[in-house]
Amino acid sequence: MSVRPLPPHDAGEIAVIGLGKSGAAAALLLRARGYEVYVSDAGSSGAVQERATTLRPSGVTADVGSHDLERIARAALVVVSPGIAPDAAPIAAATDAGVEIISEIELALRAAPSLKYIAVTGTNGKTTTTALIGHLLRALGTDAPDAGNIGTPLCEIVARPHLPEWVALELSSFQLHDTPSVAPVVGVLTNLAPDHLDRYASVEEYYGDKARMFANASHGSRWVLNADDPASLDLAAGVAGKHLMFSVREEADAFYDREHDVLQLLGDALLPRTELPLLGDHNVANALAAALAVAAAAPEHRTSAAIDAMARGLASFHALAHRLEVVGEWHDVQWINDSKATNVASTLVAIDGMTRPTVLLLGGRHKGEPYTALIDGIRAHATHVIAYGEAGPIVMQDLDGKVPVEHVQGTFEDVMHRASELARPGDAVLLSPACSSYDMFNNYMERGERFRALAAATA
């Protein structure tokens, strides 16, 4: 597939909606390519103000606290940040005027059509899998940054003086929605489960955006799929290209040989499970998906020397912050930060991976999913559930009388104090909230850092 070109410079100004990291990177890339740029953000936080101040000397016009809808409607192209809802006023203005709307990712792909990348999407595990892919590519001696939803805007990578050999690219459903040119060398679908039902009208609509990763599939495409996840297999059914499978339950192109406790890749032993420093079967699946994707990307990645290098890479990888991260152990109680678990499916994976009796912290801002799906996992692994935050009453409604659960009202400090009281020597306290953080915190990272600090205070 040929990537669509950027508009000619005389077509007019390009508007960028949203002044987060991706919006700022998009604006700087456009200015470097000689375009006139208008950026706006309805927010006026310190971070937004600071980015606007940084952009203006480069010639970017920046509005903070409002959008000039008439100006946006006159734009030659609109670049939208993933956090902007599709029904937001500036998006409606562009749509009504017939202006093309694209993501920051799409802008980067149009600016660098020769870019080679491995794309990762899915409901859970995509950030860890992306980080693993980047780590393994670098273990092979290649220049391969991580980009996209993992934190570094792709436009920032593309703006460098030289393109990297590879990019490990995480794609959220929001990003995929406005990225029609996506065509990875290898695409990975980690799994599918209901999520973001506060933004999508239905699960089908959410899955539809995930399916956009396959939009430009061809005979030469390579797709890495989860053999243990029927929803993923259904979504990819009939998609052109080679389908490669990973599994923690059965033999596949990459699988966990549970009998011998070894990760297998393309018919050969890759790594003993004991040498992978990550908790839970889901992280075994992430490691298998990453290794299979890297091996599929190029023939030179499948030599015995390359497989050995990837094995060493897996052994040297450590859990990302806020993703089943053991932050410490005090008085024989292990404290585990899984603040990134912002949906029920992710929390269920975390609970099922627990090997100690567990006090589970469940709550935050409700995202529309019932918590009843957690009951069996809680019964098997948890001694107590603490419901908290805005979702606390809904958690109680779904779980009370079925598992040991109590509602702790007040601050997050109160929640952590109660968890410390309930935990016994040999237990774990697991923050895996199944909710967004926006009732008490600015983001899941702030929530995780607060958990870390309060856990350390129990020492």
Image: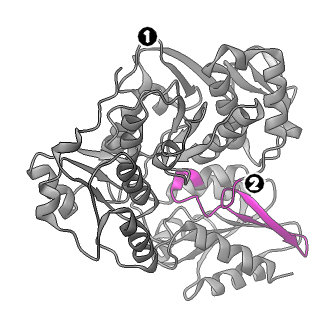
Q: Quadrant of the N terminus?
A: top left
Q: How many marks?
A: 2
- Give the side of residue 209 with respect to residue 333, left or right: left
Residue at x-position 18% and y-position 63%:
89
Q: Is residue 388 above or below residue 287?
A: below
Residue 298 spot, x, y in % from top left:
63, 18
Circle 2: residue type:
Met
Where does label 1 land, which residue?
A: 219
Report helix, strand or loop for mark 2.
Answer: loop
Viewer-closest of 417 and 189: 189
Where does label 2 land, which residue?
A: 354
Q: Which residues are magenta?
A: 320-346
> Distance between the Cα atoms at labels 1 and 2?
41 Å
Residue 430 spot, x, y in % from top left:
70, 65
Residue at x-position 32% and y-position 34%:
180
Q: Quadrant of residue 49?
A: bottom left
Report helix, strand or loop for mark 1.
Answer: loop
| Sequence-wise first label, 1 or 2 | 1
Viewer-closest of 409 and 58: 58
Q: Is residue 14 above or below residue 419?
A: above
Residue at x-position 23% and y-position 39%:
7
Q: Is residue 454 above or below residue 184?
A: below
